Image (cartoon, rainbow, N blue to C red):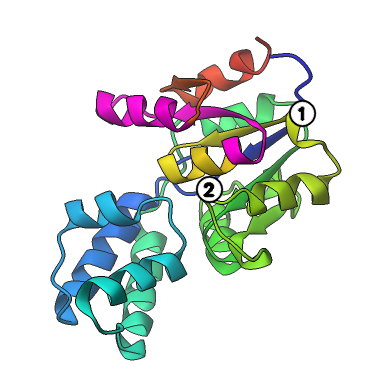
Amino acid sequence: MANVELVIFDCDGVLVNSEPIVNRIFAETLTEAGFTITYEEVIEKFVGKSFATCLEIIETTYGRPVPPIWLERGKEREIAALQQELQAISGIADTLKELTLPRCVASNSSPRHIQLVLGLTNLLHHFDGKLYSSHHVDRPKPFPDLYLHAASQMGYAPENCVVIEDSVTGVQAGSAAGMRVLGYAPSDRNSSHREALISAGAKLVFEDMRQLPNLLKV
């Protein structure tokens, strides 16, 4: 893969295995608040989307907003669960040590969440403060704004950036930004997910983070 100058990583599902934890707590909290939803429905509707977008979908679906007290309770439970259960994606620590290319993080999650999960998994130092959130731009993924912002802040042209993404929303954002996108789908994801990433614009899909350094040389 010629002319790769910057690698931009999504966070949740690419660097840390936070999504099963966050989605479980989100489903539990919503259901307790009277917005009955299953874990599977949360994955189907919300993965890769910003929290603000998720709340908009909920409000549209149920015709009323989630009370702030439930959002606060959910966030407290989420943080406690992350502190107990969160792990780095298998192989990512070794991959980040091996990579010599400049890198940064661009995530739909909040700056606080990004800092928290990367700190809990001892990955924060690999990015030297180069963390970009959808809170920094007008529109979250699937719009290209966040990836364009990250590239601009880092000083690289979009066509020389490679995005590592695990969600359709993220792949769409990277593609719309004019960047090459590599889809990450571990072996426990079904084949339809891998096909969805390709359809969204991923140049290829890989299942082991240890493959990434070689893929960036192709």
Residue named by callout 1: 160
Rendered-image quadrant of the C terminus: top right
Identify which amino acid the numbered label 1 is placed on: Asn
Residue at image coords 43%, 56%:
49
Q: Is residue 15 visible?
A: no
| Vertical side of 178 occupied by 84: above or below | below
The secondary element bearing badge 1 is classed as helix
Rendered-image quadrant of the N terminus: top right
Residue 24, x across and y down, in percent: 24, 59
Mark 2, residues whose alpha carbon is within 10 Å: few (<14), some, or many (≥20)?
A: many
Residue at image coords 28%, 67%:
26
Residue named by callout 2: 11
Relative depth, front residue between 67 and 211 = 67
Q: Quadrant of residue 46?
A: bottom left
Tell me which segment is drawn in magenta: 175-200
Q: Could you tell me how far apart the alpha carbons at marks 1 and 2 are, in whole angstroms? A: 20 Å
